[in-house]
Amino acid sequence: MSILVTGGAGFIGSHTCLNLLESGYDVFVLDSFVNSSPESLARVKSICEKDKKPKRDLHVFKGDLRNASILKDIFTKANEINKKIDGVIHFAGLKSVKESVEKPILYWDANVGSTINLLNVMQSFDCSTIVFSSSATIYGRSSKTKLKENFKLKPINPYGSTKMVIEKLLNDLFVNYSGSWRVANLRYFNPIGAHESGLIGENPKGIPNNIFPFLTNVAAGNLEELRIFGKNWPTIDGTGERDYVHVMDLAEGHVKTLEFLINNGPQCLSMNLGTGKGTSVLQLLNIFEESNSLKIPHTFVERRSGDVARLVADNSLLKSLLNWYPKRTLNQMCKDGWRWQVNNPRGY
Ligand code: NAD
Ligand code: WQD
């Protein structure tokens, strides 16, 4: 079977491509490299080559998802070599909350515009299976209880709005095309860590916004100290609580979800992809220090605008449908993420 992975060179995409190839799928990637490097996919290939498993093909195309002709070329090429694309995992998009507030039109165009283009081309090539990268950010507000998929959606920034509207668009396709579409909206929580080889990992441009790459850069001495945003949140120790999930579990979750759609017929599913376990910033810091025998200089500063106290997944739907759940521990996330940083001090 062949799968098109949009944004496959990115952080989550590259780990998922590896898992797809190792699970026996041929993979076609379309990526503009606006936020990634082709080197990530070269490394995916080299990890596969070291494995003894039967090799599948990885085809990489450089281009923007808003460009219909390159998309059509990929589907056509796949047909010509008898590798018809059976499904799409759709990661491509912009993901900075801060930038989305500054440039909402760019975000609507890059995320929603590109998805409309993708869906049009998929339809014309009779491909109607899609796993979409949604985000816990669409829930918008903090919750004392774990977040369930049927909670009210209320995104508080343009990035979150684009994710919510794409979910709605995909639901409209399922409802209005007599149930031919197989759709899964995966709402990720906080993916961290890296592949255990230390060859692929997260490679943010400039100073990282997210806590984990910030932490590894402080540990490496590239940044002076971790600034903890707020110490009076209504959480266990006053610092923000999140549901951190190992990126390889996230990758595995995509392949399991894809297989669930293939085996279970047309539907439109929205599902949390998290561990169901909350961890505060101070707890994460302590586990990182202990796992890697390091000390991280840190200081407390004001709350960050737009932050919420707690975002933790109720992952019971995932467990019951897929008969699978993320199993890697925070200790593994911290060890694997630090190995990637040490082995690649300047990224790719
Ligand atoms: P990433 O930026 O590393 O990967 C996205 C990839 O898409 C990059 O390789 C980028 O070059 C590519 N891309 C962007 N716009 C494109 C376009 N118009 N055409 C072709 N390629 C394009 O991000 P990631 O962390 O791997 O996230 C992947 C997806 O998951 C994104 O849609 C993101 O919104 C979503 N998501 C990420 C997180 C997270 O914390 N990392 C959480 C929830 C959801
Ligand atoms: C985690 C915790 C911060 C940095 C973001 C996006 C979300 C999703 C995942 C894409 C919070 C604290 C952080 C720092 C800190 N991405 N923190 N010092 O905000 O949960 O989610 O990434 O969909 O949409 O909003 O992740 O890693 O930025 O923050 O104290 O330097 O760490 O306050 O409690 P967040 P994060």
Image (cartoon, rainbow, N blue to C red):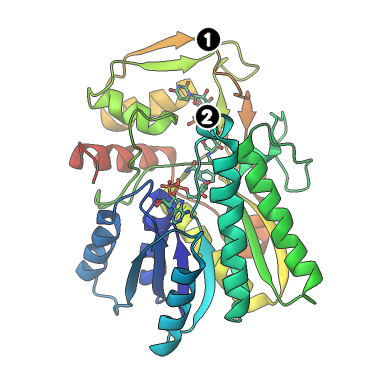
Q: Is residue 294 left or right of residue 319?
A: left
Residue name at image x 61 percent, y 23 percent: 306
301 up-or-down from 196: above or below: above
Picture coordinates of residue 238, whole percent (x, y): 57, 15
Which of the 4 image quarters holds residue 181?
bottom right
Residue name at image x 32 percent, y 25 percent: 289
Which of the 4 image quarters holds residue 285?
top left
Between tags 2 and 1, which lies in front?
A: 2
- In this orientation, which residue lies closer to the viewer: 154 or 77? 77
Q: Which residue is mark 2?
A: 98
Q: Which residue is mark 1?
A: 302
Mark 1: give few (<14), some (14-19) or many (20+) Cα within 10 Å.
few
The residue at label 1 has a CB less than 8 Å from ligand 2: no
- In this orientation, which residue lies closer to the viewer: 299 or 7? 7
142 up-or-down from 65: above or below: above
Tag 1 secondary structure: loop
Residue name at image x 62 percent, y 20 percent: 235
Q: Is residue 245 left or right of residue 344?
A: right
Of the two numbered discs 2 and 1 on the same chain, state the one appearing first in sequence.
Answer: 2
Which of the 4 image quarters holds residue 221?
top left
Residue name at image x 48 percent, y 84 percent: 84
Q: Amino acid at mark 2?
A: Lys
Picture coordinates of residue 287, whole percent (x, y): 39, 29
Q: Do labels 2 and 1 touch, CB within 8 Å?
A: no
The residue at label 2 has a CB less than 8 Å from ligand 2: no
Picture coordinates of residue 43, whole percent (x, y): 24, 58
Q: Amino acid at mark 1?
A: Glu
Mark 2: give few (<14), some (14-19) or many (20+) Cα within 10 Å.
some
| Residue 323 can be seen, yes or no | no
Tag 2 secondary structure: helix
Q: Is residue 135 left or right of residue 141?
A: left
Structural distance between the alpha carbons of marks 2 and 1: 17 Å
